[in-house]
Image: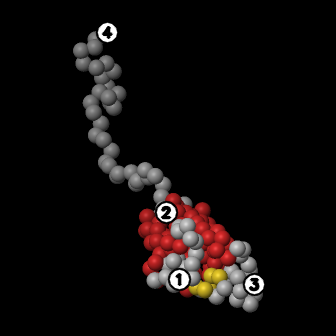
Amino acid sequence: MIRNVLGSLMGLIGAAAAVWSPFRAWYDGRHGRDYRIRDLFAPTGITDHEAVLLGSLLLPFLFAALLTVAAVLRRSRLLMALAGIVVLGFTILWMVRQGQAAGSLTVGADGEGIGDGVANAFGAGALLILAAAVMTGRRPGYRTPPTAAAPEPTPYRDAAWPPNPPGDHP
């Protein structure tokens, strides 16, 4: 039980970090909420066009947060791991597409290059997967046995006398 509580807490912290990450700088000071989700799948790649809030990178992270809440309520390790895979998958996809658009990815201390929003997203995805590993989840098919009264003894089966059933004479 303590592992489920600890895993649930870790998962909820990871989901909060994932939802918070698009509001941080992702690349060259541009926030994750400014990247359109469809740019990740378009052949043109990432553009400079601004995104609406629910059409940005926030959308898959909100979906992962909903998966996390469902995982906590159902005590499901699978849903928790799936939420982590969604967060890590979209973060890696963004990195690939940003690297294609920019020519290369850089990390700089002066606000240039990859920002702390990407680090938050990676940390959140890793924490969600770690939470799935910590949780014990439900035991499949486990139910408490019903408390039934002991069966009444039947004649000749539980009694010692008569030694032979009726009609069976030596």
Task: Please name the residue that numbered disc 4 is placed on.
Answer: 170
Q: Could you give the CA–CA distance between mark 3 and mark 4, rounded to whole angstroms?
A: 100 Å
Mark 1 or mark 3, earlier in chain: 1
Q: What residue is at 31 percent from the left and 18 percent from the top?
A: 164
Earlier in the chain: of badge 4 and badge 2, it is 2
Residue under pointer 3? 108
Give me the residue at 48% from left, 58% from top.
Answer: 138
Do tag 1 and tag 4 residues touch (Cβ < 8 Å)?
Answer: no
Three-letter amino acid code at disc 4?
A: Pro
Q: Helix or strand or loop: what does disc 2 sit on?
A: helix
- The furthest residue to the bottom: 110
Secondary structure at numbered mark 4: loop
Query: Badge 4, how many Cα within 10 Å: few under 14, some, many 20+?
Result: few
Q: Is residue 118 left or right of residue 20?
A: right
Other-residue count near label 3 (Cα within 10 Å), few / some / many at <14 / 14–19 / ≥20: few
Q: Look at mark 1 in the image and give the residue it sits on.
A: 49
How far apart marks 4 and 2 lie (CA) works out to 68 Å
Which tag, 1 or 4, sits closer to the chain's start? 1
Question: What residue is pinned by disc 2?
Answer: 79
Q: Amino acid at mark 3?
A: Gly
Q: Nearer the viewer, residue 99 or 5?
A: 99
**Mark 1 → mark 4, Cα distance in angstroms:** 101 Å
Q: Secondary structure at mark 1?
A: loop
Q: Is residue 34 above or below residue 3?
A: below
Residue at 46% from the left image edge and 68% from the top image edge: 67
Q: Nearer the viewer, mark 4 or mark 2?
A: 2
Can residue 62 be seen from the camera position used here? no
List x then y, in percent, for residue 65.
Answer: 48, 73
